[in-house]
Amino acid sequence: MYADKRERGHHREEIRRLKTAVFAHRGYPHARQALQVVRWRRDLGTGKLTIKRIHLVTSLPPGEATGSELSAWIRGHWRIENQLHHVRDRTFHEDASKIRTHHLPRVMAGLRNLAIGVHRQDGHTNIAAALRRTARDHLRPLTALGLT
């Protein structure tokens, strides 16, 4: 199955092509399809072209979803993933963190995710502003968690 999508926006033009193939491998007993997404992206300001290729494996049997449905699910996953990483990097400067030993990086990522989740559950969309607001009152995080 092939599915192509063209989009223009954010000062770039993008073409995405999805290819699927039936997949069976002893090492992956639940896998049913292999997918390849190729993305051509041209920056309209500079003219620079970048090409990215990603591969995925899914347990969804062939024919259960159309190419556009698969593409939408893949993009939805990356939108969520990028949204969380963007907040963790821009607000908490996670990529610049010097914590590198043992389980501490994973623990800190979990704490950052907890803080983001609590603020989002509390209705905040701007996590940086929510953190600044929370820093002014030491009881506010406890209240958000329902502990006071």
Image: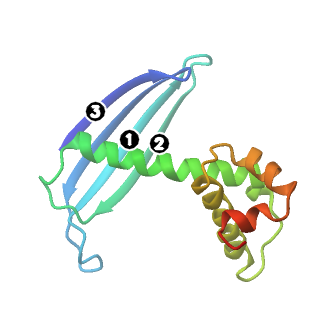
The amino acid pointed to by label 1 is Val
Tell me if label 2 and label 3 are in contact, CB under 8 Å: no
Is the residue marked by circle 3 packed among few (<14), some (14-19), or many (20+) residues within 10 Å?
some
Please indicate whether residue 98 sits to the left or right of residue 71 in the image. right
Q: Residue furthest top?
A: 45
Measured in 3D between alpha carbons, the distance from the residue under mark 2 to the one under mark 3, in whole angstroms, is 15 Å
Circle on res. 38: 1
Residue placed most toward the observer, 57 or 105: 105
The amino acid pointed to by label 3 is Asp
Q: Residue at x 67, y 67 (%)?
A: 109
Q: Where on the picture, by quarter, is residue 7?
A: top left
Q: Residue furthest right?
A: 136
The amino acid pointed to by label 2 is Lys
Element type at marker 3?
Answer: strand
Q: Residue furthest front?
A: 148
Measured in 3D between alpha carbons, the distance from the residue under mark 3 to the one under mark 1, in whole angstroms, is 10 Å
Colour basis: rainbow
| Residue on which the image places disc 3 | 4
Tell me if label 1 and label 2 are in contact, CB under 8 Å: yes
Viewport quadrant of the N terminus: top left
Element type at marker 2?
Answer: strand
The image shows residue 89 at horizontal and vertical percentages of 71, 52
Q: Residue furthest left?
A: 63
Residue placed most toward the observer, 40 or 96: 96
Is the residue marked by circle 1 packed among few (<14), some (14-19), or many (20+) residues within 10 Å?
some
The image shows residue 99 at horizontal and vertical percentages of 80, 71
Element type at marker 1?
Answer: strand
Please indicate whether residue 62 sits to the left or right of residue 9 in the image. left
Circle on res. 52: 2
